């Protein structure tokens, strides 16, 4: 069995419910093809580097799962059929995993998440004790769109000169 | 002749020693999901900067170029960037 990761860019104007249904469908396909669903990482709506279907934004989600090549083929065939999916990309993460190792990984991830959650609640509790209002607004800020909207960092002057010369 | 200058070299530029940033810093990961880090290795046009300029080692340049290409594929990085003014 192999471990894969699929990044799906879905329509940003989708209703939350439709989007959940979409992800449920994907999960069903993975289950149907005897795959093991590991994680769904929702990055939220991000600015695209180029237009896809005349749209400048897209809703990113990253799925991690274990399965065979047939599963990937079936999943990608279905993703191509869904109108809501603008683009997707599947990447092989690990060539040699077993169902047991994946189950173990899933357990570990859950344990880590639970640990992080308790730590966070402890933290918030401590914060609220210390400074009543400030802590509440802090975790709520969206962390989705850090990278894409910033202007490109200046390359070193030497670098830029050498590379751009032939184009001028 | 200046002190420290090599005898046989005219017009020799001072060359900074290039080091691979990924070899120096073990925590620095090459990941296609992190376009912010990859942006340092592409031009404003969106081209991958050759390793003779950035100093990246061969091993990491291979991984870097793959990551940049994957990142372009899912629209985190542009295939063609805006031309510099």
Image (cartoon, grey):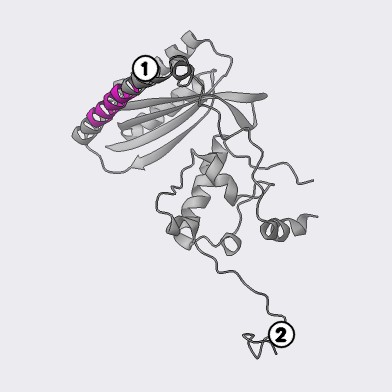
Read off the chain for label 2.
Answer: B
Residue A1 visible to the viewer: yes
User: Viewer-proximal residue, B80 or A43?
Assistant: A43
Residue A29 visible to the viewer: no
Query: Magenta-highlighted stretch: main secondary structure?
Result: helix
Residue A69 lies in the magenta-colored region: no
Q: Nearer the viewer, mark 1 or mark 2?
A: 1
Q: Position of residue B74 (x, y in %)?
A: 54, 34
Provide the residue designation for mark 2.
B10
The residue range painted magenta reads: A107-120
Q: Position of residue A128 (x, y in %)?
A: 39, 17
Q: Position of residue B65 (x, y in %)?
A: 53, 51
Q: Residue furthest left?
A: A100
| Residue under the image location 45 percent in, 21 percent down | A139
Quadrant assignment, res A83:
top right
Q: Residue furthest front?
A: A130
The reply to the same-chain question for discs 1 and 2 is no
Quadrant assignment, res A122:
top left
Q: How much space separates mark 1 and mark 2, taking CA atoms?
A: 70 Å
| Residue under the image location 59 percent in, 69 percent down | B16
| Residue under the image location 30 percent in, 32 percent down | A67
| Residue under the image location 53 percent in, 10 percent down | A15
Tell me the number on the disc at residue A129.
1
Q: Is residue A54 left or right of residue A31?
A: right
- Vertically, is A163 above or below A24? below
- Vertically, is B66 above or below A44? below
Read off the chain for label 1.
Answer: A
Q: Position of residue A80 (x, y in %)?
A: 50, 25
Query: Dot 1, crowdedness within 10 Å: few (<14), some or many (≥20)?
Result: few
User: Viewer-proximal residue, A79 or A4?
Assistant: A4
């Amino acid at each position: 069995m192999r471990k894969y990761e699929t990044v799906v860019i879905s329509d940003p104007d989708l209703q939350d419910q439709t989007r959940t249904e979409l992800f449920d469908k994907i999960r069903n396909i993975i289950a149907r093809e005897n795959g093991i669903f590991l994680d769904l990482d929702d990055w939220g709506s991000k600015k695209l580097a180029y237009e896809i279907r005349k749209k400048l934004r897209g809703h990113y989600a990253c799925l991690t799962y274990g399965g065979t090549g047939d599963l990937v083929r079936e999943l990608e065939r279905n993703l191509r059929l869904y109108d809501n999916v603008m683009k997707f990309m599947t990447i092989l993460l690990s060539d040699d995993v077993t169902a047991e190792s994946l189950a173990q990984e899933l357990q570990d991830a859950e344990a880590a998440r639970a640990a992080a959650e308790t730590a966070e609640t402890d933290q918030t509790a401590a914060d609220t004790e210390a400074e009543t209002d400030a802590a509440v607004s802090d975790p709520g800020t969206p962390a989705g769109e850090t990278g894409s909207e910033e202007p490109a960092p200046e390359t070193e002057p030497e670098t830029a000169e050498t590379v751009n010369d032939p184009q001028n | 002749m200046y002190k420290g200058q090599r005898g046989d070299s005219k017009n020799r530029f001072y060359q900074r020693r290039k080091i691979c940033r990924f070899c120096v810093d073990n925590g620095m990961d090459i990941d296609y999901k992190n376009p912010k880090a990859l942006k340092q290795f592409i031009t404003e046009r969106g081209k991958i900067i050759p390793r003779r300029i950035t100093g990246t080692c061969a091993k990491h340049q291979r991984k870097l170029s793959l990551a940049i290409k994957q990142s372009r594929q899912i629209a985190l990085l542009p295939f063609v960037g805006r031309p510099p003014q």
